[in-house]
Image: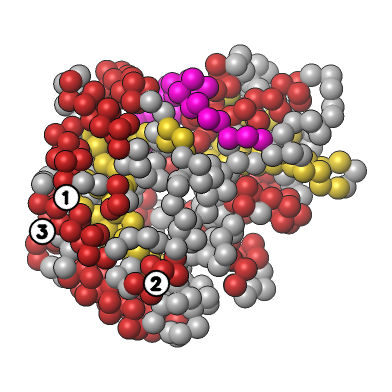
Amino acid sequence: MNDNSLDVLLVNPPSGSAGYTKSPWRYVLSSNVSYGLLSLSSYLTKHGMNAAIIDSSAHSYTNAETLEIVKRYDPACIAFSATTTSISNAAYLCSRIKELNPEIITIIGGSHVSSIPERTMQLFKSFDIAVLNEGELTLSELLKRLKSSRSDLSDIKGIIFRENSKLIRTAPRQFIENLSDTLPLPDWSILPDFPKAYQPPIFFSPSSRVATLVTSRGCPYSCNFCNKSVFGNNYRSFTAEYIIECIKILSRDYNINYFLFYDDNFTVDKQRLTNICDLIIKSNLNISFSCDAHVNTLTPEIIILLKRAGCWSISFGLESGSRKILESFGKTSDLEKARDIVNLTHSNGIRTKGLFILGSPEETLGTIDETIDFIKNLKLSTINLSKFAPYPGTKYYDMLQHDNEIELWDTLNGTTFTDINKNIPLDILEKEYYRVLKYFYNNKHVFAEHLGYILGSSNNVLRLSKSFACKIAHC
């Protein structure tokens, strides 16, 4: 596989313990396209460079398996895109790669290093260069410079590099304003085993023929628990025509009939949203899709239009049923309006998913009771209850007490409580977490609906069977 024409190998590393052990439940959980790497590779190809992708997270590769694939490519330059939970695996892989080939250039990008760049580079010496924030323009310019006779990198905006044992941070790069004109249509053919390797969760999906699309960047809202270091607050979007072309290609070439819009907020721009829905309807695409929405962006008319266009489910960032918690998060949602919009969405035949967070510094037993009371009044098809994670780049990160920062990063995954909440002992907080889940999923109608998703698809039954077999065999 050694290919001297390869300009860069792009890697999405495993997260946390997945770098060392395979979970038996990997067959039933979702595996999403690393859309950032897909966009990078497509942009590089447009500008005359060759890239390949290793999507370790989606394929459930361990660090050892990832390393073996890297060896077969033997690239001169390798670039990782890492979150907080995968940054230590990226660093480990870079150190092993450096042992095999000290001349290889290692680049790190993604949300974690964009949040705390100097600290990340100080702790992980195996990273040569960091690309901050949006990566397409920066990585393209950087790769061209590395291939040229010029060695000075100081005029390339948006990077950190090492020079004489010092870290040099260059001027920031402006965000891309016109996404549709600047970025090409994604080239899904570069993704190994697409779309088969990329599956939705078996518990909440109408189809296994699925593709992820990110149709905008930046979020105009000010939720202070959210890390927006990569794309910022300035909302920018692809045009409706660009998005429809993506859908047509995926439908025609890959037989995709279900789309996951992974924007932070798909419904911010009502005119663009209306245009997208109208084009889907007029084009007779016969697809279904899911998206995330802020309750303040939806109206009865928009909900009806979304349903006509094929909207299967909407995820709402509700976070809590306590006004005190919402105010501490910087959320502007009104609980009564949130209830009305969620229930109206469900009444119009669109499945509703509530996204909640438990265990913030302000959380008390009383605010948890308020969240349960809130859920009682919502017509929700399913919920996602995350354990509060104080991510780097947010105000909460500096409130943490930790002896080992790298070990801490591995736990900021939404499934592990930290010690940031001083009101409730950790063991009680764990019990409260399961109390909320039990309250919701003990509902016989909710249970029956989820069972229907699993048993209604032979592919889902097969995936569940594989997980149980793997659990028994310890594979």
Out of 262 and 417, give the one closest to the viewer: 262
Q: Amino acid at mark 3?
A: Ala
Say whether residue 85 is left or right of residue 24. Answer: right
- Is residue 188 on the magenta stretch? yes
Above or below — where is 427 with respect to 415?
below
Which residue is tagged 2? 325
Above or below — where is 448 with respect to 175?
below
Give me the C-alpha separation between circle 3 and circle 2: 32 Å
Q: Amino acid at mark 2?
A: Ile
Q: Quadrant of residue 450?
A: bottom left
Q: In x, y percent, where is residue 224?
A: 49, 61
Could you tell which of marks 1 and 3 lies nearer the N-terminus? 1
Above or below — where is 372 with respect to 150?
below
Residue at 72 percent of width and 44 percent of height:
127
- Which of the two marks, 3 or 2, is nearer to us in this view? 2
Residues packed near mark 1 inside 10 Å, few (<14), some (14 to 19) or many (20 plus): many
Q: In x, y percent, where is residue 223?
A: 45, 58
Q: Which mark is residue 448?
A: 3
Q: Is residue 125 shown to the viewer in this render?
A: yes
Residues tagged 3 and 2 counted as in contact (Cβ below 8 A) = no
Instruction: Say which element carries label 1.
Output: helix
Q: In x, y percent, where is residue 341?
A: 20, 54
- Which of the two marks, 1 or 3, is nearer to us in this view? 1
Q: Is residue 66 shown to the viewer in this render?
A: no
Instruction: Say which element carries label 2.
Output: helix
Q: Amino acid at mark 1?
A: Thr
Instruction: Say which element carries label 3.
Output: helix
Q: Which mark is residue 345?
A: 1
> Which segment is the magenta one?
173-199
